[in-house]
Image (spheres, helix red, strand yellow):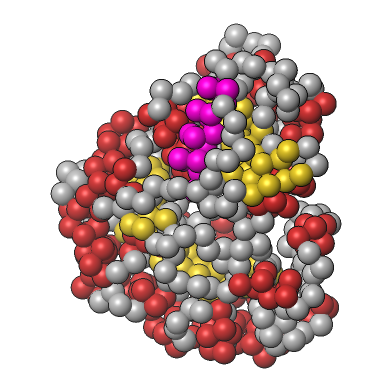
Amino acid sequence: MNSHGWGNNKKGPIVLVSRPIAYTFPLSYAYLAGYLLQQGEDVRIVFKRNDNADLIRQIMEMDPLLVGFGSLYPELREVAHLIDLLDKAGRRFPTVIGGQMVSPIPEFAVEISGADFGVIGEGEIILSDLVRSLREGNDSSDLPGLVIRNGKEIVSNGPGPYIQDLAQLPPVPYELFPVNEWLRVGKWYSLNYPQPHWRHQDRVINVHGGRGCPYRCNFCYHHSVPRYRPIPQMLDEAQLGLERFNANMLYFSDDLVLATPSRALQLVNGLRQLGKSVDYSVSTRFDILNRLDDNLLEAMRETGCRIMGLGIESGSDRILKLIGKNCTSTEILHNLGRLKRVGILPTVSIMVGQFTETVEDVEASIKLMIESIRDNPNIQYAFTITTPFPGSPLYEYILKNGLVKNNHDFYERYFSGDGHWNMVVNLSKMTNEEVFAMYKKINTLYLLEKKKCLGHAVNTLLLGRRIFNRVNRFVESRLLQRSETSLQSPRIANTYYSFQEKFCNSVQNLDLRLRGLQN
């Protein structure tokens, strides 16, 4: 044992613990693993599950050099619980945490989680340096980019190095990930949240466009200057993924792929050269969409752009300006109309309880939502209550003005809820009761307006899909149980899944025809 109480298995693997794959591919873990693999390291990725005891046993049996956790702030308490379980199991290796749960509040994150190290900023180089130091038995206490627990003391070494030229990102090590769990994004949506945006048969390749952000929305975590991946490199990588996994869709998950009209045009021209017809989903902002002319939008649709993710956040021009959206409600409605005309399906979001927001501001959001649904009932909305997460300007505000005492106070408030949207701190000019009432109102009116605008036939079909999906969950659970006791169950399961595929595709095609969205 060394002075920290760790064992000396310098030949053990690096274990990264990811959340289960559902509707998107965990690119952050992929790039961490890919960078370590380039250094000749043995990397294992394991996935959280309902049975923590089995997960802990799996990790302990690997006798790793170190175990890494990371992701967004909402997972911080769960990570702390898993590290505690590893401690109780007698772990003899260090734990390291990273991601947005750490970088804005590194010392606190290490303290509350019980981890030995925290990574500040992007982790590829920093984690690799730590691994090399542990392998060689060197002192890690002065490595930049780390927060280090030393007994009761927690010391920060400040920011560390990061990959400045994103063309140097390592290839994605797909072999470390369970393929069917992330390729079948369309199936996940079809069986959980039926909508015209996703098809049951969609097999999706995620593509990373860049890091950092040139904008400063008040609710968002900012960690670095914007850096962009070359579009040709992104599409070369995408083509390899499409061919390797017989996929039909690309998911560009960050805003930076369309950061400028010139990048959008490069994307369109590159997609035309792929040699394979694909659909794709992109994310952007309304102030960027304002700069993409109709010809470019038409070209995007012609090359397969099916979905565009956008953050509305508010229908109030005053709140939009406060957030930093650089657009007006009139421009939002105008651009949603443009997307409808070219045939691109929007997914959008609105938050309730923004800084100084009033009932009248939320009513403006409701008005915008209803007007947009009446023009295009196929828009998909999501609603949230404003949460000032660490790293955001709003978090700085609530600390500075005493709305929360400190990081620990925020942590306790945030994790005191029941898993639904709770209000950590009221930033608005409404009472708490008014915030929740307006949040309920916008959700209720959205469902009512959507039902009214979609019409009887589509609503009946959606009801049928929901009933089928409930039955399907029951059947799948029974198939999984039988797989352990019956030699016939694989044949039965394959027959059922074949029926499921045909049924969902048939219903989906009818749904698209009724909505006027035939392929």
Q: Quadrant of residue 356?
A: bottom right
- Front-most of 367 and 89? 89
- Between residues 496 and 340, which one lies in front from this camera angle? 340
Q: Residue at x 50, y 56 (%)?
A: 195
- Residue 110 x %, y %: 71, 45
Classify 476 as above or below 456. Answer: above
User: Where the N terminus falls, by quadrant?
Assistant: top right
Q: Residue at x 25, y 76 (%)?
A: 294
Q: Is residue 430 above or below residue 301?
A: below
Across and down, in percent, residue 410 comes to 78, 62
Q: Residue at x 78, y 64 (%)?
A: 406
Question: How many marks on residues?
Answer: 0
Q: In terms of image quadrants, where is residue 444?
A: bottom right
- The residues colored magenta run 122-137
Magenta stretch, main secondary structure class: helix
Compared to 365, does 509 lie above or below?
Answer: above
Residue 511 horizontal/vertical position (percent): 46, 56
Q: Is residue 135 magenta?
A: yes
User: Is 313 displayed left or right of 434 in the figure?
Assistant: left
